[in-house]
Image: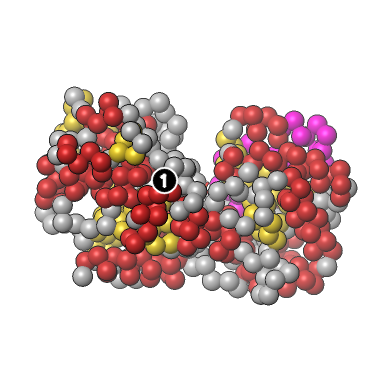
Amino acid sequence: MEILHVSAECYPVAKAGGLGDVAGALPLYLNEAGHLAKLVMPMYRTKYLYSHSWDIVHKGYTNLGNRWFEFTVIKERTNELGFDLYLLDINGLLDREKVYGYDDDTERFTAFQIAVLDWVTAWQHQPDIVHVHDHHTALIPFMMGNCYKYVSLRHIPTVITIHNAEYQGWMGWDKSIYIPPWDMWNWGRLDWNNTINPLASGIKCASRVTTVSPNYLEELKTMSNGLEALFEYEKGKCVGILNGIDSNVWDPQTDKYITHHYSVNDFEAGKAKNKMELCERFNLDFQKPLISFIGRLVGEKGADVLPSVIGDSFWHIGRRMNFLVLGSGNHHTERELERMLEQASGDYAVYIGYNEALSHLMYAGSDFLLMPSRVEPCGLNQLYSMRYGTVPMVRRTGGLKDTVIDYEDEGGYGICYNHTSTGDISQGVFRAVELYRTKKKLNANRETMMKLDFDWKTSVQKYIEVYEQLIK
Ligand code: ADP
Ligand code: GLC
């Protein structure tokens, strides 16, 4: 089968979060399973672009409403990522450093999707499946099925994967002129609550919908930022498939970002060396359990409660543990976390920003990884931390519930709690401190986690089943 993935992110080209990791791995593992998977994404001005060689494969002209624009598609020459990687450039819209966060994101991603379909229309053959990810590419199923200029693509099945239903790409009906001519009788396929809702449209129009964990799909029926009824209505075509991890990138034996490698046979010494490096760098106490947080500092991740959890833990449990936070996002949370340094330095450190290398060192060198998420469609951090023998401390939600079993339950290894509240999380911190004291139990947990299989090889088979059902 030939599958074309369309995504706003793809590691290592451009990554803002887990979507990038998944888009960088899924096509690779599909290819390894014997299929032909390709990926097209916007040509942001990232380091990866300038450090690789490219061939121009297509040039075209098209419109975003009244705005006429030229676009270019280039392909990475060496197939370094293990699949065909295409970047699509639109001057004035996509030629920026960052992936998201611009006032004209609606225009940027709508133009990108139109240009992708213009390009695919010009191919001499057609892909078997078009697979889109999240709201930035979710208008594609509608456009393929309804726009007159894409009538030749109408029969190609589409799959949309929902990595995060909190963001839906809402745009006013005044922007409907951006979409190439279509039969206006079908306006209901774009609409949700009187606005164009790209994610809702993707769910309505795609042949199949997947979410990144089974439990998240269940939760969406009762909590999906306004789309609950739609998920209930469309449940027949939805399936939850857990993300995998790319073991070429995330392996403590070979990780290119860390110096002290280790495996399940020598993790105690290996983790200690990485922890020492972290503690020296951030002036923390090697003897105390190190509890880390890595992620976007937003409400979804529960980042706003971190300052009070840290304060509360020191107050009630004493300075018996260290905290290290890596992240960026909400400015208020960033400032609060920096302010915590005044009262807690020596036992707490924070790095505001995005730092891929540091994140790897933290997965390797921390004892525990805190994830108090309010919403977590899958969560990759807990999967990485387990692979590196670091105990995840998670709220029972979304994919966290699917992947982490509390160490006091049968077959368990992690620490679980029910609410994103200071009380619940601090109780988790207390349990972490206790677990750290019983090294034997802690090491048994580490060993169990490091042997768990969250490899893409397993998950990718489930995507293949979905595709096969569609092209039968
Ligand atoms: P989400 O996609 O919702 O942010 P995931 O758990 O799926 O959450 O994936 C987050 C990914 O982004 C992980 O690879 C994590 O290591 C990485 N990440 C998040 N914030 C940072 C940061 N500040 N620096 C480095 N990596 C980060
Ligand atoms: C989203 C979700 C996260 C998931 C990731 C990759 O960003 O928030 O939970 O792991 O996508 O699917």
**Residue located at (16% from left, 42% from top):** 147
Mark 1 secondary-structure assignment = loop
Q: Position of residue 236 (x, y in %)?
A: 34, 62
Q: How many marks?
A: 1
Q: 131 or 347: which is nearer to us? A: 131
- Residue 84: tell me if it is visible: no
Q: Quadrant of the C terminus?
A: bottom left
Q: Is residue 368 left or right of residue 198?
A: right
- Residue 270: tell me if it is visible: yes
Q: Which residues are magenta?
A: 338-362
Q: Is residue 412 magenta?
A: no
**Residue located at (43% from left, 48% from top):** 228
In the rendered structure, which amino acid carries the disc numbered 1? Answer: Leu
Q: 143 or 331: which is nearer to us? A: 143
Q: Quadrant of the N terminus?
A: bottom left
**Residue located at (86% from left, 43% from top):** 315
Q: Is residue 345 magenta?
A: yes
Q: Position of residue 320 (x, y in %)?
A: 86, 51
Find disc 1 in the rendering and name its residue. Answer: 227
Q: Position of residue 55 (x, y in %)?
A: 24, 46
Q: State the image quarter where residue 183 is shown.
A: top left
Q: Above or below — where is 388 with respect to 199?
A: below
**Residue located at (79% from left, 64% from top):** 435
Q: State the image quarter where residue 100 is shown.
A: top left
Q: Above or below — where is 459 with respect to 124?
A: below
Q: Position of residue 89 (x, y in %)?
A: 28, 37
Is disc 1 surrounded by few (<14), some (14 to 19) or many (20+) residues within 10 Å? many
Q: Above or below — where is 167 with respect to 404?
A: above
Q: State the image quarter where residue 173 is shown.
A: top left
Q: Is residue 32 left or right of residue 336?
A: left
Q: 316 or 347: which is nearer to us? A: 316
